[in-house]
Structures are given as C-alpha cells and as structure tokens.
Amino acid sequence: MNVSELLTNLTQQGVNLWADKDKLKINSPKGILTPQLQADIAARKTEIIAFLRDNNHNSSDTATGLSLQTIGRLIGGYCQRMPMDFKSPIINPQVMAKQLKVTFRPLPKGFKNKEKEIEILKFRGELEQKLQNQGVQICSWQEATREFHYEIPIPLVKWNKSMKMRVVKADVNAVIDVERPINFIGKIKSWIAEKYYQISSHLSGKDKKVSVAKIAQLIGWAEDHAIQRLEDPTSTQVILITELDKNFVDSQLPYEGKIGIGINTLVKTFSEIVIGVSNTHISILNMNLSDSVFPREKFDNFVAKSLIPKIYVPIAPLPISQFEVDKYEPKQSNYAAKLVELSKELATTGLYPSGFKLSEIIKRKSHRDIVDSIVNGRTGVSYGFVAYAEPPQYVGTVEISANQWEDLLSVDGFSNNEVRQNNIGRRYIKTKIKDKYVYKQIPDIWLVCSRSGANKTALNLERDIVRMGLKNQLCLQLPLGMNTNEVDIKPSYDTYVMVAIALATALYTPQLIQEGAPIIHFHGYPSRQWFESHEYYAGVENPSVPCGTYESGVFNFLNIHNIAENNDSKIALASLIEPDHGTNIITSNLEYLLTRLATGIQQQQIELGGKYFASLK
C-alpha cells in the first residue's frame, strides 16, 4: 500500500493527519488506530510528512479547502489550555456506522401473537440486517451485557437485599427494544419501587445528587424499561420499536398537537429514539420532535441518513465548564435590544410553540432525577432558538496575500497548511472560495441569544439573553446582576450551530453579517415556492444529526460555504436545512426577516413540522 492509499484509508475511517514542521500530528476516533496501523504510520513517518507537504494534502479536505478537524476545532473553540480534546468530526454515515456497536434486547415472552407484533418482529429482523450491511457491529445480548450484583439498603432497618441483573456494557452505543406491555403485577411493583426510591432520597438528603446508574439499581428490579438495564445511560441510547402512531405522522394534524404526542411517547417508553412501524411506513422520533416519515421502500435510506447519525451523535447539552464565563450588561447592548424586538414579533408567527417543564410531564421522582442528570440540570425544554450576531471583530488586516501567509507562524493543534497566526496572535485561515484560495483573518465572533429553556417569544432583556463568544475558545457572558439561583441559566443546545453559522457567514458571505445579523431556528420548513430572488437554501441531503451536536455545527458551516460557492454575492437570505429537525435562517436585516416570515405565514408557505421538507429536494 502506497502513502496515498494509506492516507485515503485512514481518512475514510475519520483519521486526520497533518505535518507541523518535522512532526506528524494525528487525530483519530477511539479504537481506529490499532497497534499494527500505528506501527505502519511510525515506520513511514518521514514519507508521509513529505507527501503531505509536496501535495499540500489534507486528509479530510472539504469543498472549503479545510479539513473537517479544522472546521470542528474552530467552531468548538479548541485551545491548548482546555483539558478537553476535540475529536475530528465525522459527517459520513458510512464512517459513523463503523464506529457503532448495537445490541437487540431479547423479546418478551409471548411476543409475536398479534398482527402488529408480527409486523414489528419482521421490521426488527430487517433492521438488524440493514445495520450490519452499513458496517454497524451487532452484538448478541450475551456479548453486550454483563451480570451485575448489587445490594439495596432497606430504610430504617440494618438490612441489605442482594440483587442481580444483566446490564448493557457502557461501550455499547444503543440497545434496541420493543414496547413491552405493563400488567397489573408490574404496576404494583413499579409503585412499590417508586415509594422506596422516594423514601431513600428523603433519608439521604435533598442536596445529595444520585447517579443515573444508582437510580437504576434502586428501581430497576421492578422496571422493564431498557434504560434500567444500562451500565451507563449517558453513553448508551435506548431505541424502541413500536406501532406507527398514525396521528403523529398525519400531515393534517397541526404540529402543536404533535408535541404532546411525541413528548408523552418518549417519556412513557423512557427512550431516546422511538421508531414507529407499519407495513407501509417508518417514522422516527427523538427530542427534536421531528414528524418525519419514510416509505418502507426507502428503508436503506432511513437507516443510513436518519437512524445511524442519531445513534452516532446523541443529543447532549454543552456543559458550562466548556466556556470561559463572564458577565455583560444587556442594557448597553443594541443587539440584545434588537433580539427582544425580534422575540416579540415572532410571537405572531406561530413558529415557536410553548415549551414545557420536565417536572410537569414526568410525574415520577425517580424518572425526573434520571432525566435531570442526563440533561445536565435543565428544568425545561423549548423549541427553536433566536439569536442576533454582532459584526465580526478583527484586529489588523482582514485579508492577506499568499506571500504574507508564508511569513506567519504555526498554531498548536491546527494544520500549518490551514491555520497560522501573526506575531500578535491573530489567526488566519487558508480557505477556498470559488476555486481560489484566500487568506482571511479569523474574527472574534459574538452573538446574543436566548438562554436554554427561555420563552423565545417573550424574552426578558435582563434575565433571558446571554452573550456567546467564539474567540480562541467558547465564551459565555451572563446578564450582570442576575441571580443565577432564581433563573435557570444554561448554554443553548444549539451553541455549535449558532457560532458555526456566524463564523462561516463572516468568512464566506461577509455582507450578511457586517452590520450584525438576526438568526432564527424553528422546527419546520419553508416550501420551495417561498424563496425569492437572492434567497437560497442548502442542507436538504445532509444526514440528519440531532440538534446542537458538534457535527450539526459542521454541516451548517458547510451549508453557508455551499450557498456562497454556488450563487452570486448578492445573498439576501440563507436558509440552512436540518433534516428531521428544522430550519436555520440568517439575514442581514431584522425588518427584512420579519417581512419575509410574515409573507410566508400568510401565504401558507412556512409551517412547523415536515410538511414542506419534500418540496426542497
């Protein structure tokens, strides 16, 4: 195998290599670099470095001229000071599939006696085969689980009850189960387990946090949800196969009516993903609350483009520890004021339905505590985001020549072919625009946005708007004087998406953001007929990764570049489509955005849910 073939093989598996002076730098997904591969790379290090330099080769080149790792590290705020290492994002479902390990939970006794159960059983078998065909590792239940022994302390008496169960190992990405009926005895056991958990929680103290695994131990003996059989519920997703809910996928039912159905389904089954099955269609549901439905003849496309990406990148909030945290004065921000104005105007569009508090829909304390741990303390869920990007901030020359680029210094953690810095630490990027390489300064990005869980159509200037920054790392500024004990302040799930859109717009369509730009996201789509002259969209064929993930930020970055690459510079509006999720829109003018949205609503060309998604293909 020659060097070119070796690098191509590594690239297809998500490995990124680049030359930094005389050193070979490598970033790889876990488990890819076997001892043999490491030995091959080490033996040919000099040859590989020479090849990379001579060919200006980048092992993950995109249409931007940038590697996926560079894009990911830019939008993720990578810096050497941070203990967290940013992995290279993978956006190819075939490569994602090869990283996955999935198991199917054994069927309950007596299953397949009913017509709907026979259909689910048939689908289950086909799904296992199609996942295998895509490269997913399917583990038997015996291989994927281990026997776990533990003791449950009995309150008020000094006695422990020994228990054992088989739990799914933490390195398994997903366990696929079928919906299991709960009989009368099961309900009694669940009631007893819940009462026991409440008493145990009370005796241990209100302020003492209990891990998800510990909660599962305390109530798992009486529960038949797959989540109670997981070694680590934060690393293994539960996917449930059930009968297709015809109401949920009914195109005539307004999206607001589907929210209750979707949320109750997820909570009732305690699953991250629910797959609905009939003999003609397949639906998929997660916390994005997409109402996507696929014909059975598109089964392969459903697995590759929708299911595998959701397993590979589960929805997870960004911890506040990933940000450099500070304060700001919202009353002194023109952009915070504009965001409040945008918020109020959006109330009339109907694109932002009311969210909900988790405590209102999850009645059992044990289940609330499990969800609380998984969502990192967030108390509610809302739909969409609203943000206002400030003008990009530059220091010195915005664009330099190729000769000036050669005089710049390397930046730790980045390929020297893609990112360099001058003597005052301002970073420059070598990127491709319409087949021509340009050398642009990477600006500091700042935007104001709604805090996670806020009412997007009634933002309070002093407590609902945070300021997000992307400099050498992610920054988060909280409103000055706000009591964080009274208000639930958490970074938005869509942080990566917002900063990616703002940064890509500054690099590729600067006219959209040079005076600031409103950005919105809603869980629906415009029809193709809505778009007017100089309004463009991209992203329809992307794999449907969930909201807020690292990969979703990368896709939005690439979507902006795609629009700039394929259209003239007179871009008035960019619509970035996220399959199974919704739409992001950025424009240069608040009044223009509001006018266009009002027109779309009036002419029935914009709607929540997936009604108009097919028209965009």
Image (cartoon, rainbow, N blue to C red):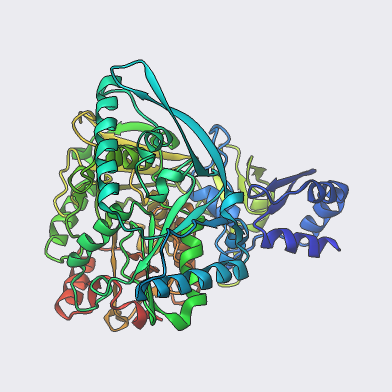
Query: Where 466 sits versus 603, above or below?
Result: above
Front position in the image: 483 or 502: 483
Is residue 433 depicted above or below 202 in this figure? Answer: below
Res 5 quadrant in image: bottom right
Query: On the image, which quarter does residue 91 sit in?
Result: bottom right
The answer to which of 359 and 593 lies nearer the viewer is 359
Quadrant of res 56: bottom right
Visible in this render: residue 77?
yes
| Residue located farthest toward the top when viewing the structure as drawn | 158
Which residue sits at x=20%, y=76%? 600
Quadrant where the C terminus sits is: bottom left
Q: Please state if 98 lies on the left or on the right of 449 as rendered.
A: right
x and y percent of residue 45 in the render? 84, 48
- Identified at 24% across, 77% down, the residue is 250
604 vs 493, left or right, is: left
In the picture, the quarter occupied by the N terminus is bottom right
In-front residue for pair 66/353: 353
Residue 479: image location, x then y, percent: 24, 35
Is residue 551 visible in this depiction of the protein?
no
Give the mark count: 0
Image spot of residue 525 (x, y percent): 30, 72
Toward the viewer: 329 or 530?
530
Q: In screen coordinates, is 516 left or right of 342?
A: right
Q: Residue 259: x, y in percent?
A: 22, 62
